[in-house]
Amino acid sequence: MALKPLGLGLASRRVLSDVVTDDLRDAIISHDLEPGRRIAEDELALQMGVSRGPIREALMRLDREGLVTIERHKGARVASWDDTDIQEIYSMRSALEVLAIEWACKNATASDLKAMEEILNIYSKLSEKQRTPREVSRLDLEFHTALFAAAHHARLFKTWEVLRSQIHAFLVYTWSQDGKINKVFLPQWGPDHKVFVEIIRNKQVEKAKETVIRHIERGLARVETHFIEEPKPKKKVTKR
Amino acid sequence: MALKPLGLGLASRRVLSDVVTDDLRDAIISHDLEPGRRIAEDELALQMGVSRGPIREALMRLDREGLVTIERHKGARVASWDDTDIQEIYSMRSALEVLAIEWACKNATASDLKAMEEILNIYSKLSEKQRTPREVSRLDLEFHTALFAAAHHARLFKTWEVLRSQIHAFLVYTWSQDGKINKVFLPQWGPDHKVFVEIIRNKQVEKAKETVIRHIERGLARVETHFIEEPKPKKKVTKR
DNA sequence: TGGTCTATTGTTGTTTACAAACAACAGTTT
DNA sequence: AAACTGTTGTTTGTAAACAACAATAGACCA
Protein backbone atom coordinates (compact mmCIF):
# COMPACT_ATOMS: atom_id res chain seq x y z
CA MET A 1 0.00 0.00 0.00
CA ALA A 2 1.29 3.46 -0.88
CA LEU A 3 2.40 5.73 1.93
CA LYS A 4 0.48 8.87 2.59
CA PRO A 5 2.29 12.07 1.63
CA LEU A 6 4.36 13.13 4.61
CA GLY A 7 4.43 16.30 6.63
CA LEU A 8 1.00 17.43 5.67
CA GLY A 9 -0.92 17.30 8.91
CA LEU A 10 -2.98 20.33 8.09
CA ALA A 11 -1.81 21.03 4.59
CA SER A 12 -3.29 17.80 3.33
CA ARG A 13 -6.64 19.49 3.51
CA ARG A 14 -5.45 22.10 1.07
CA VAL A 15 -6.60 21.48 -2.42
CA LEU A 16 -4.89 22.41 -5.68
CA SER A 17 -7.08 25.39 -6.38
CA ASP A 18 -6.12 26.78 -2.95
CA VAL A 19 -2.44 26.52 -3.78
CA VAL A 20 -2.89 28.13 -7.18
CA THR A 21 -4.98 30.92 -5.69
CA ASP A 22 -2.39 31.73 -3.04
CA ASP A 23 0.52 31.57 -5.46
CA LEU A 24 -1.24 33.78 -7.96
CA ARG A 25 -2.27 36.26 -5.28
CA ASP A 26 1.31 36.52 -4.05
CA ALA A 27 2.54 37.01 -7.60
CA ILE A 28 0.07 39.83 -8.15
CA ILE A 29 0.70 41.51 -4.81
CA SER A 30 4.46 41.40 -5.29
CA HIS A 31 4.04 42.77 -8.81
CA ASP A 32 5.64 39.75 -10.43
CA LEU A 33 2.59 39.97 -12.63
CA GLU A 34 2.19 43.59 -13.57
CA PRO A 35 -1.25 45.26 -13.63
CA GLY A 36 -3.06 44.85 -16.91
CA ARG A 37 -1.21 41.70 -17.83
CA ARG A 38 -3.16 39.05 -19.66
CA ILE A 39 -3.44 35.64 -17.98
CA ALA A 40 -4.17 32.69 -20.27
CA GLU A 41 -5.45 29.59 -18.52
CA ASP A 42 -3.43 27.16 -20.63
CA GLU A 43 -0.20 29.07 -20.21
CA LEU A 44 -0.57 29.26 -16.45
CA ALA A 45 -1.68 25.64 -16.21
CA LEU A 46 1.42 24.49 -18.06
CA GLN A 47 3.65 26.74 -15.97
CA MET A 48 2.26 25.50 -12.65
CA GLY A 49 1.98 21.89 -13.69
CA VAL A 50 -1.74 21.50 -13.08
CA SER A 51 -4.71 21.26 -15.35
CA ARG A 52 -6.98 24.15 -16.26
CA GLY A 53 -9.66 23.24 -13.72
CA PRO A 54 -7.96 24.54 -10.59
CA ILE A 55 -6.65 27.50 -12.58
CA ARG A 56 -10.15 28.51 -13.59
CA GLU A 57 -11.31 28.21 -10.02
CA ALA A 58 -8.44 30.31 -8.73
CA LEU A 59 -9.04 33.00 -11.33
CA MET A 60 -12.71 33.16 -10.39
CA ARG A 61 -11.82 33.61 -6.73
CA LEU A 62 -9.30 36.32 -7.49
CA ASP A 63 -11.87 38.02 -9.68
CA ARG A 64 -14.13 38.07 -6.67
CA GLU A 65 -11.26 39.49 -4.63
CA GLY A 66 -10.82 42.20 -7.21
CA LEU A 67 -7.25 41.25 -8.09
CA VAL A 68 -8.06 40.08 -11.61
CA THR A 69 -10.87 40.92 -13.98
CA ILE A 70 -12.51 38.22 -16.05
CA GLU A 71 -14.42 38.95 -19.23
CA ARG A 72 -16.56 36.30 -20.86
CA HIS A 73 -14.76 34.49 -23.67
CA LYS A 74 -11.92 36.94 -23.32
CA GLY A 75 -10.12 35.67 -20.28
CA ALA A 76 -8.50 37.28 -17.28
CA ARG A 77 -6.10 40.15 -16.69
CA VAL A 78 -4.41 41.44 -13.60
CA ALA A 79 -6.40 44.35 -12.19
CA SER A 80 -4.92 47.82 -12.37
CA TRP A 81 -5.60 50.81 -10.16
CA ASP A 82 -6.35 54.45 -10.73
CA ASP A 83 -7.47 57.31 -8.51
CA THR A 84 -11.14 56.30 -8.75
CA ASP A 85 -10.34 52.86 -7.35
CA ILE A 86 -8.45 54.40 -4.46
CA GLN A 87 -11.40 56.64 -3.59
CA GLU A 88 -13.77 53.68 -3.70
CA ILE A 89 -11.57 51.41 -1.66
CA TYR A 90 -10.90 53.90 1.10
CA SER A 91 -14.50 55.06 1.40
CA MET A 92 -15.58 51.44 1.71
CA ARG A 93 -12.83 50.78 4.19
CA SER A 94 -13.85 53.69 6.35
CA ALA A 95 -17.48 52.55 6.49
CA LEU A 96 -16.48 48.97 7.24
CA GLU A 97 -13.94 49.82 9.93
CA VAL A 98 -16.42 52.01 11.75
CA LEU A 99 -18.84 49.11 11.83
CA ALA A 100 -16.04 46.77 12.82
CA ILE A 101 -14.89 48.80 15.79
CA GLU A 102 -18.47 49.26 16.96
CA TRP A 103 -19.00 45.52 17.01
CA ALA A 104 -15.53 44.94 18.43
CA CYS A 105 -16.40 47.17 21.38
CA LYS A 106 -19.36 44.94 22.06
CA ASN A 107 -17.97 41.51 21.19
CA ALA A 108 -14.20 41.49 21.56
CA THR A 109 -12.89 38.77 23.86
CA ALA A 110 -9.69 38.85 25.88
CA SER A 111 -7.96 36.66 23.33
CA ASP A 112 -9.03 39.00 20.53
CA LEU A 113 -7.32 41.88 22.31
CA LYS A 114 -4.30 39.71 22.96
CA ALA A 115 -4.04 38.88 19.26
CA MET A 116 -3.97 42.56 18.39
CA GLU A 117 -1.36 43.30 21.03
CA GLU A 118 0.74 40.43 19.80
CA ILE A 119 1.04 42.11 16.41
CA LEU A 120 2.09 45.36 18.09
CA ASN A 121 4.66 43.34 19.99
CA ILE A 122 6.16 41.90 16.86
CA TYR A 123 6.43 45.41 15.47
CA SER A 124 8.12 46.78 18.57
CA LYS A 125 10.73 44.06 18.42
CA LEU A 126 11.72 44.95 14.88
CA SER A 127 14.88 46.98 14.48
CA GLU A 128 14.64 50.20 12.53
CA LYS A 129 16.19 48.50 9.52
CA GLN A 130 13.64 45.72 9.64
CA ARG A 131 10.81 48.20 9.49
CA THR A 132 10.58 48.11 5.73
CA PRO A 133 7.48 49.30 3.85
CA ARG A 134 6.77 45.71 2.87
CA GLU A 135 6.99 44.38 6.38
CA VAL A 136 5.12 47.19 8.10
CA SER A 137 2.33 47.21 5.54
CA ARG A 138 1.96 43.48 6.12
CA LEU A 139 1.72 44.03 9.88
CA ASP A 140 -0.66 46.89 9.31
CA LEU A 141 -3.08 44.74 7.36
CA GLU A 142 -2.69 41.95 9.88
CA PHE A 143 -3.56 44.28 12.73
CA HIS A 144 -6.67 45.53 11.01
CA THR A 145 -7.60 41.96 10.16
CA ALA A 146 -7.36 41.15 13.86
CA LEU A 147 -9.62 44.11 14.52
CA PHE A 148 -12.21 42.82 12.08
CA ALA A 149 -11.92 39.38 13.63
CA ALA A 150 -12.61 40.91 17.04
CA ALA A 151 -15.91 42.21 15.72
CA HIS A 152 -17.21 38.64 15.38
CA HIS A 153 -19.22 39.52 12.30
CA ALA A 154 -18.80 36.90 9.58
CA ARG A 155 -20.10 38.93 6.64
CA LEU A 156 -18.16 42.00 7.64
CA PHE A 157 -15.00 39.93 7.85
CA LYS A 158 -15.52 38.41 4.43
CA THR A 159 -16.06 41.82 2.90
CA TRP A 160 -12.92 43.09 4.58
CA GLU A 161 -10.90 40.20 3.18
CA VAL A 162 -11.80 41.26 -0.34
CA LEU A 163 -10.85 44.84 0.39
CA ARG A 164 -7.66 43.77 2.12
CA SER A 165 -6.40 41.94 -0.95
CA GLN A 166 -6.93 45.02 -3.06
CA ILE A 167 -5.27 47.32 -0.56
CA HIS A 168 -2.36 44.93 -0.24
CA ALA A 169 -1.98 44.84 -4.01
CA PHE A 170 -1.12 48.51 -4.28
CA LEU A 171 0.04 49.40 -0.78
CA VAL A 172 3.34 47.55 -0.73
CA TYR A 173 4.21 48.97 -4.11
CA THR A 174 3.07 52.49 -3.24
CA TRP A 175 4.90 52.67 0.05
CA SER A 176 8.05 51.25 -1.44
CA GLN A 177 8.21 54.16 -3.82
CA ASP A 178 7.50 56.82 -1.21
CA GLY A 179 10.71 58.32 0.11
CA LYS A 180 9.19 60.18 3.05
CA ILE A 181 7.34 57.19 4.47
CA ASN A 182 10.43 55.63 6.00
CA LYS A 183 11.27 58.59 8.19
CA VAL A 184 7.86 59.88 9.17
CA PHE A 185 5.35 57.11 9.13
CA LEU A 186 6.97 53.75 9.76
CA PRO A 187 8.44 54.62 13.21
CA GLN A 188 5.11 56.02 14.33
CA TRP A 189 3.02 53.05 13.29
CA GLY A 190 3.17 51.23 16.60
CA PRO A 191 1.99 54.05 18.91
CA ASP A 192 -0.66 54.99 16.38
CA HIS A 193 -2.25 51.57 16.63
CA LYS A 194 -1.83 50.98 20.32
CA VAL A 195 -4.65 53.39 21.08
CA PHE A 196 -7.13 51.21 19.24
CA VAL A 197 -6.64 48.32 21.60
CA GLU A 198 -7.24 50.53 24.62
CA ILE A 199 -10.32 52.13 23.13
CA ILE A 200 -11.84 48.75 22.38
CA ARG A 201 -10.91 47.41 25.80
CA ASN A 202 -12.69 50.37 27.42
CA LYS A 203 -15.62 50.11 25.01
CA GLN A 204 -15.47 53.80 24.10
CA VAL A 205 -17.66 53.43 21.03
CA GLU A 206 -17.93 57.07 20.01
CA LYS A 207 -14.25 57.82 20.46
CA ALA A 208 -13.48 54.64 18.55
CA LYS A 209 -15.51 55.72 15.56
CA GLU A 210 -13.90 59.16 15.40
CA THR A 211 -10.43 57.74 15.76
CA VAL A 212 -10.93 55.16 13.05
CA ILE A 213 -12.30 57.70 10.61
CA ARG A 214 -9.32 60.00 11.09
CA HIS A 215 -6.98 57.02 10.89
CA ILE A 216 -8.32 55.90 7.52
CA GLU A 217 -8.38 59.47 6.22
CA ARG A 218 -4.69 59.83 6.95
CA GLY A 219 -4.03 56.52 5.22
CA LEU A 220 -5.91 57.71 2.18
CA ALA A 221 -3.98 60.97 2.12
CA ARG A 222 -0.68 59.10 2.05
CA VAL A 223 -1.71 56.86 -0.81
CA GLU A 224 -3.56 59.55 -2.71
CA THR A 225 -0.66 61.90 -3.31
CA HIS A 226 1.22 59.02 -4.81
CA PHE A 227 -1.54 58.11 -7.23
CA ILE A 228 -2.02 61.66 -8.41
CA GLU A 229 1.65 61.75 -9.36
CA GLU A 230 1.50 58.46 -11.18
CA PRO A 231 -1.86 57.88 -12.84
CA LYS A 232 -2.29 54.46 -14.35
CA PRO A 233 -4.40 53.54 -17.34
CA LYS A 234 -7.53 51.64 -16.38
CA LYS A 235 -7.86 49.29 -19.32
CA LYS A 236 -5.82 48.05 -22.23
CA VAL A 237 -2.47 48.53 -20.62
CA THR A 238 -0.46 46.07 -22.64
CA LYS A 239 -1.60 44.14 -25.65
CA ARG A 240 -0.31 40.92 -24.16
CA MET B 1 -23.90 24.75 -43.18
CA ALA B 2 -25.92 24.64 -39.96
CA LEU B 3 -28.05 27.65 -39.09
CA LYS B 4 -27.30 29.61 -35.97
CA PRO B 5 -29.84 29.18 -33.17
CA LEU B 6 -32.55 31.78 -33.71
CA GLY B 7 -33.90 34.47 -31.43
CA LEU B 8 -30.83 34.79 -29.26
CA GLY B 9 -29.64 38.29 -30.00
CA LEU B 10 -28.49 38.92 -26.47
CA ALA B 11 -29.10 35.57 -24.86
CA SER B 12 -26.48 33.95 -27.02
CA ARG B 13 -23.89 35.68 -24.91
CA ARG B 14 -25.19 33.89 -21.88
CA VAL B 15 -23.20 30.91 -20.97
CA LEU B 16 -24.37 27.71 -19.27
CA SER B 17 -23.01 28.60 -15.85
CA ASP B 18 -25.02 31.84 -15.98
CA VAL B 19 -28.23 29.95 -16.66
CA VAL B 20 -27.55 27.45 -13.91
CA THR B 21 -26.68 30.21 -11.44
CA ASP B 22 -29.89 32.13 -12.14
CA ASP B 23 -32.09 29.04 -12.03
CA LEU B 24 -30.56 27.90 -8.78
CA ARG B 25 -30.82 31.35 -7.23
CA ASP B 26 -34.50 31.54 -8.12
CA ALA B 27 -35.09 28.08 -6.71
CA ILE B 28 -33.46 29.07 -3.43
CA ILE B 29 -35.21 32.43 -3.14
CA SER B 30 -38.59 30.90 -3.84
CA HIS B 31 -37.88 28.18 -1.28
CA ASP B 32 -38.20 25.39 -3.83
CA LEU B 33 -34.95 24.29 -2.26
CA GLU B 34 -35.41 24.57 1.47
CA PRO B 35 -32.64 25.94 3.72
CA GLY B 36 -30.15 23.32 4.81
CA ARG B 37 -30.82 21.07 1.87
CA ARG B 38 -27.87 19.24 0.45
CA ILE B 39 -27.01 19.91 -3.21
CA ALA B 40 -25.06 17.15 -4.97
CA GLU B 41 -23.30 18.21 -8.15
CA ASP B 42 -24.06 15.00 -10.01
CA GLU B 43 -27.72 15.06 -9.13
CA LEU B 44 -28.16 18.65 -10.19
CA ALA B 45 -26.14 18.14 -13.36
CA LEU B 46 -28.34 15.24 -14.38
CA GLN B 47 -31.47 17.17 -13.53
CA MET B 48 -30.47 20.23 -15.54
CA GLY B 49 -28.96 18.31 -18.40
CA VAL B 50 -25.47 19.81 -18.22
CA SER B 51 -22.14 18.52 -17.04
CA ARG B 52 -20.69 19.18 -13.60
CA GLY B 53 -18.44 22.00 -14.76
CA PRO B 54 -21.08 24.75 -15.02
CA ILE B 55 -22.75 23.39 -11.89
CA ARG B 56 -19.56 23.76 -9.88
CA GLU B 57 -19.09 27.26 -11.18
CA ALA B 58 -22.65 28.22 -10.28
CA LEU B 59 -22.32 26.79 -6.78
CA MET B 60 -19.12 28.76 -6.23
CA ARG B 61 -20.84 31.96 -7.26
CA LEU B 62 -23.80 31.31 -5.00
CA ASP B 63 -21.43 30.52 -2.17
CA ARG B 64 -19.94 33.95 -2.71
CA GLU B 65 -23.45 35.39 -2.68
CA GLY B 66 -24.09 33.66 0.61
CA LEU B 67 -27.00 31.58 -0.67
CA VAL B 68 -25.19 28.26 -0.41
CA THR B 69 -22.37 27.06 1.81
CA ILE B 70 -19.60 24.95 0.36
CA GLU B 71 -17.36 22.79 2.53
CA ARG B 72 -14.23 21.17 1.16
CA HIS B 73 -14.83 17.60 0.05
CA LYS B 74 -18.28 17.81 1.56
CA GLY B 75 -20.22 19.70 -1.05
CA ALA B 76 -22.83 22.41 -0.91
CA ARG B 77 -26.01 23.06 1.02
CA VAL B 78 -28.61 25.77 0.82
CA ALA B 79 -27.84 28.45 3.40
CA SER B 80 -30.15 28.83 6.37
CA TRP B 81 -30.81 31.88 8.50
CA ASP B 82 -31.01 32.57 12.19
CA ASP B 83 -31.18 35.70 14.32
CA THR B 84 -27.41 36.21 14.21
CA ASP B 85 -27.48 36.33 10.42
CA ILE B 86 -30.27 38.89 10.48
CA GLN B 87 -28.29 41.13 12.83
CA GLU B 88 -25.22 40.87 10.62
CA ILE B 89 -27.07 41.50 7.40
CA TYR B 90 -28.95 44.54 8.65
CA SER B 91 -25.95 46.15 10.33
CA MET B 92 -23.99 45.73 7.10
CA ARG B 93 -26.89 47.05 5.11
CA SER B 94 -27.16 50.12 7.27
CA ALA B 95 -23.47 50.95 6.90
CA LEU B 96 -23.57 50.38 3.15
CA GLU B 97 -26.73 52.37 2.52
CA VAL B 98 -25.37 55.34 4.42
CA LEU B 99 -22.31 55.30 2.21
CA ALA B 100 -24.49 54.78 -0.85
CA ILE B 101 -26.72 57.75 -0.19
CA GLU B 102 -23.71 59.96 0.54
CA TRP B 103 -22.20 59.11 -2.82
CA ALA B 104 -25.58 59.31 -4.52
CA CYS B 105 -25.97 62.89 -3.26
CA LYS B 106 -22.68 63.69 -4.97
CA ASN B 107 -22.90 61.56 -8.11
CA ALA B 108 -26.51 60.86 -9.01
CA THR B 109 -27.44 61.85 -12.54
CA ALA B 110 -30.88 62.86 -13.79
CA SER B 111 -31.39 59.43 -15.28
CA ASP B 112 -30.46 57.80 -11.98
CA LEU B 113 -33.22 59.73 -10.24
CA LYS B 114 -35.59 58.90 -13.08
CA ALA B 115 -34.86 55.20 -12.67
CA MET B 116 -35.77 55.40 -8.98
CA GLU B 117 -38.97 57.32 -9.70
CA GLU B 118 -39.90 54.81 -12.36
CA ILE B 119 -39.98 52.07 -9.73
CA LEU B 120 -42.18 54.22 -7.49
CA ASN B 121 -44.44 54.73 -10.51
CA ILE B 122 -44.82 51.01 -11.07
CA TYR B 123 -45.77 50.64 -7.43
CA SER B 124 -48.35 53.41 -7.52
CA LYS B 125 -50.03 51.79 -10.51
CA LEU B 126 -50.51 48.52 -8.69
CA SER B 127 -53.96 47.85 -7.31
CA GLU B 128 -54.24 47.00 -3.65
CA LYS B 129 -54.62 43.33 -4.50
CA GLN B 130 -51.48 43.38 -6.63
CA ARG B 131 -49.45 44.70 -3.70
CA THR B 132 -48.48 41.25 -2.48
CA PRO B 133 -45.53 40.73 -0.16
CA ARG B 134 -43.67 39.02 -2.97
CA GLU B 135 -44.20 41.83 -5.45
CA VAL B 136 -43.55 44.71 -3.06
CA SER B 137 -40.43 43.12 -1.64
CA ARG B 138 -39.17 42.72 -5.19
CA LEU B 139 -39.85 46.39 -5.90
CA ASP B 140 -38.26 47.34 -2.60
CA LEU B 141 -35.01 45.61 -3.45
CA GLU B 142 -35.11 47.04 -6.96
CA PHE B 143 -35.51 50.54 -5.57
CA HIS B 144 -32.59 50.18 -3.23
CA THR B 145 -30.55 48.67 -6.05
CA ALA B 146 -31.30 51.78 -8.09
CA LEU B 147 -30.14 53.84 -5.13
CA PHE B 148 -26.85 51.95 -4.99
CA ALA B 149 -26.48 52.33 -8.74
CA ALA B 150 -26.93 56.10 -8.33
CA ALA B 151 -23.93 56.16 -6.03
CA HIS B 152 -21.64 55.20 -8.94
CA HIS B 153 -19.37 53.18 -6.69
CA ALA B 154 -18.50 49.85 -8.28
CA ARG B 155 -17.25 48.07 -5.16
CA LEU B 156 -20.14 49.29 -3.06
CA PHE B 157 -22.57 48.05 -5.68
CA LYS B 158 -20.97 44.62 -5.84
CA THR B 159 -21.11 44.30 -2.07
CA TRP B 160 -24.75 45.32 -2.09
CA GLU B 161 -25.57 42.67 -4.69
CA VAL B 162 -24.30 39.99 -2.35
CA LEU B 163 -26.34 41.36 0.52
CA ARG B 164 -29.40 41.77 -1.68
CA SER B 165 -29.43 38.10 -2.59
CA GLN B 166 -29.38 37.15 1.05
CA ILE B 167 -32.08 39.61 2.00
CA HIS B 168 -34.20 38.45 -0.89
CA ALA B 169 -33.78 34.84 0.23
CA PHE B 170 -35.55 35.38 3.53
CA LEU B 171 -37.61 38.52 2.96
CA VAL B 172 -40.20 37.12 0.57
CA TYR B 173 -40.73 34.18 2.84
CA THR B 174 -40.81 36.26 6.02
CA TRP B 175 -43.22 38.85 4.71
CA SER B 176 -45.50 36.20 3.28
CA GLN B 177 -45.99 34.79 6.73
CA ASP B 178 -46.55 38.12 8.43
CA GLY B 179 -50.26 38.85 8.75
CA LYS B 180 -49.92 42.49 9.77
CA ILE B 181 -47.65 43.47 6.93
CA ASN B 182 -50.44 43.63 4.36
CA LYS B 183 -52.48 46.25 6.20
CA VAL B 184 -49.81 48.41 7.74
CA PHE B 185 -46.69 48.32 5.68
CA LEU B 186 -47.43 47.53 2.07
CA PRO B 187 -49.73 50.53 1.43
CA GLN B 188 -47.21 52.88 2.98
CA TRP B 189 -44.24 51.68 0.99
CA GLY B 190 -44.54 54.21 -1.82
CA PRO B 191 -44.67 57.41 0.27
CA ASP B 192 -41.91 56.08 2.49
CA HIS B 193 -39.53 55.81 -0.43
CA LYS B 194 -40.51 58.92 -2.29
CA VAL B 195 -38.65 61.07 0.22
CA PHE B 196 -35.36 59.44 -0.68
CA VAL B 197 -35.50 60.69 -4.23
CA GLU B 198 -36.15 64.24 -3.08
CA ILE B 199 -33.40 64.16 -0.50
CA ILE B 200 -30.89 62.98 -3.07
CA ARG B 201 -32.07 65.50 -5.62
CA ASN B 202 -31.54 68.29 -3.09
CA LYS B 203 -28.24 66.81 -1.95
CA GLN B 204 -29.23 66.94 1.73
CA VAL B 205 -26.46 64.61 2.87
CA GLU B 206 -27.00 64.76 6.62
CA LYS B 207 -30.76 64.36 6.42
CA ALA B 208 -30.21 61.52 3.97
CA LYS B 209 -28.01 59.62 6.39
CA GLU B 210 -30.44 59.98 9.29
CA THR B 211 -33.39 58.96 7.17
CA VAL B 212 -31.66 55.89 5.79
CA ILE B 213 -30.58 54.71 9.22
CA ARG B 214 -34.12 54.98 10.58
CA HIS B 215 -35.45 53.30 7.46
CA ILE B 216 -33.21 50.27 7.80
CA GLU B 217 -33.87 50.08 11.53
CA ARG B 218 -37.59 49.82 10.89
CA GLY B 219 -36.95 47.14 8.28
CA LEU B 220 -34.90 45.19 10.79
CA ALA B 221 -37.59 45.50 13.43
CA ARG B 222 -40.19 44.03 11.08
CA VAL B 223 -38.01 41.05 10.17
CA GLU B 224 -36.65 40.56 13.66
CA THR B 225 -39.92 39.87 15.43
CA HIS B 226 -40.55 37.17 12.91
CA PHE B 227 -37.24 35.47 13.46
CA ILE B 228 -37.54 35.54 17.21
CA GLU B 229 -40.83 33.70 16.94
CA GLU B 230 -39.47 31.12 14.57
CA PRO B 231 -35.82 30.36 15.25
CA LYS B 232 -34.16 28.12 12.70
CA PRO B 233 -31.32 25.72 13.30
CA LYS B 234 -28.06 26.95 11.87
CA LYS B 235 -26.52 23.69 10.75
CA LYS B 236 -27.55 20.16 10.07
CA VAL B 237 -31.15 20.87 9.34
CA THR B 238 -32.01 17.78 7.37
CA LYS B 239 -29.78 14.81 6.89
CA ARG B 240 -30.41 14.85 3.17
C1' DT C 1 -21.86 -6.25 23.80
C1' DG C 2 -18.94 -2.68 22.55
C1' DG C 3 -15.22 -0.69 20.09
C1' DT C 4 -11.95 -0.31 16.50
C1' DC C 5 -10.40 -1.28 12.18
C1' DT C 6 -11.21 -2.09 7.35
C1' DA C 7 -13.73 -2.13 3.14
C1' DT C 8 -17.27 -0.20 0.48
C1' DT C 9 -19.84 3.50 -1.47
C1' DG C 10 -20.94 7.90 -2.74
C1' DT C 11 -19.25 12.46 -3.46
C1' DT C 12 -15.97 15.90 -4.69
C1' DG C 13 -11.38 17.20 -6.88
C1' DT C 14 -8.69 16.80 -11.12
C1' DT C 15 -7.43 15.68 -15.66
C1' DT C 16 -7.97 15.20 -20.52
C1' DA C 17 -10.29 15.83 -24.74
C1' DC C 18 -13.56 18.25 -27.52
C1' DA C 19 -16.59 22.17 -29.09
C1' DA C 20 -17.63 27.01 -29.51
C1' DA C 21 -16.46 31.77 -29.41
C1' DC C 22 -13.59 35.53 -30.44
C1' DA C 23 -9.74 38.10 -32.79
C1' DA C 24 -6.61 38.79 -36.37
C1' DC C 25 -5.48 38.47 -41.02
C1' DA C 26 -5.75 37.75 -45.99
C1' DG C 27 -8.18 37.76 -50.14
C1' DT C 28 -11.71 39.50 -52.87
C1' DT C 29 -14.91 42.91 -54.44
C1' DT C 30 -16.51 47.50 -55.20
C1' DA D 1 -8.00 52.24 -51.10
C1' DA D 2 -11.78 50.79 -48.17
C1' DA D 3 -14.93 47.49 -46.71
C1' DC D 4 -16.70 43.10 -46.54
C1' DT D 5 -16.19 38.07 -46.13
C1' DG D 6 -14.08 33.92 -45.23
C1' DT D 7 -10.35 31.48 -43.03
C1' DT D 8 -7.10 30.37 -39.50
C1' DG D 9 -5.32 30.35 -34.90
C1' DT D 10 -5.74 31.08 -30.13
C1' DT D 11 -8.39 30.90 -25.99
C1' DT D 12 -12.29 29.95 -23.31
C1' DG D 13 -16.57 26.93 -22.33
C1' DT D 14 -18.27 22.16 -21.76
C1' DA D 15 -18.23 17.24 -21.31
C1' DA D 16 -16.82 12.90 -19.62
C1' DA D 17 -13.55 9.83 -17.44
C1' DC D 18 -10.37 9.18 -13.63
C1' DA D 19 -8.41 9.79 -8.86
C1' DA D 20 -8.74 11.14 -4.06
C1' DC D 21 -11.17 11.96 -0.09
C1' DA D 22 -14.96 11.43 3.61
C1' DA D 23 -18.64 9.02 5.62
C1' DT D 24 -20.75 4.84 6.61
C1' DA D 25 -21.58 0.09 7.35
C1' DG D 26 -19.93 -4.24 8.45
C1' DA D 27 -16.56 -7.51 10.19
C1' DC D 28 -13.48 -8.83 13.54
C1' DC D 29 -11.66 -8.97 18.11
C1' DA D 30 -11.61 -8.03 22.97
Image (cartoon, coloured by chain):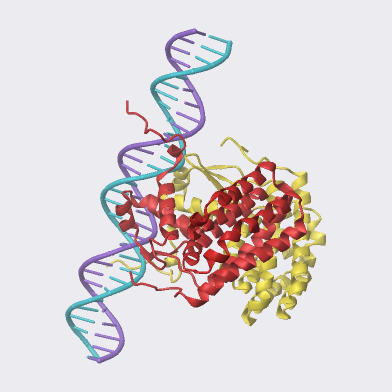
Chain colours: A red, B yellow, C cyan, D purple
Q: Is residue C12 left or right of residue A114?
A: left
Of C8 and A111, nearer the camera is: A111
Which image quarter: residue A31?
bottom left
Residue found at x 62% / y 64%: A92
- What is the x, y in percent for residue A73? 38, 64
Q: How many dots with numbers?
A: 0
- What is the x, y in percent for residue B51? 40, 49
Can residue B50 be seen at all in this image of the molecule?
A: no
Q: Is residue B107 above or below residue B3?
A: below
Q: Is residue B91 left or right of residue A175?
A: right
Q: Considering the image in quadrants, where does the N terminus of chain A appear?
A: top left
Of A198 and B77, nearer the camera is: A198
Residue found at x 75% / y 77%: B204
Residue found at x 43% / y 59%: A30
Residue found at x 67% / y 67%: B99
Q: Is residue A66 left or right of residue A42?
A: right
Which image quarter: residue B64?
bottom right
Which image quarter: residue A87?
bottom right
Q: Considering the image in quadrants, where does the C terminus of chain A appear?
A: bottom left
- What is the x, y in percent for residue B39? 52, 44
- What is the x, y in percent for residue A82? 50, 72
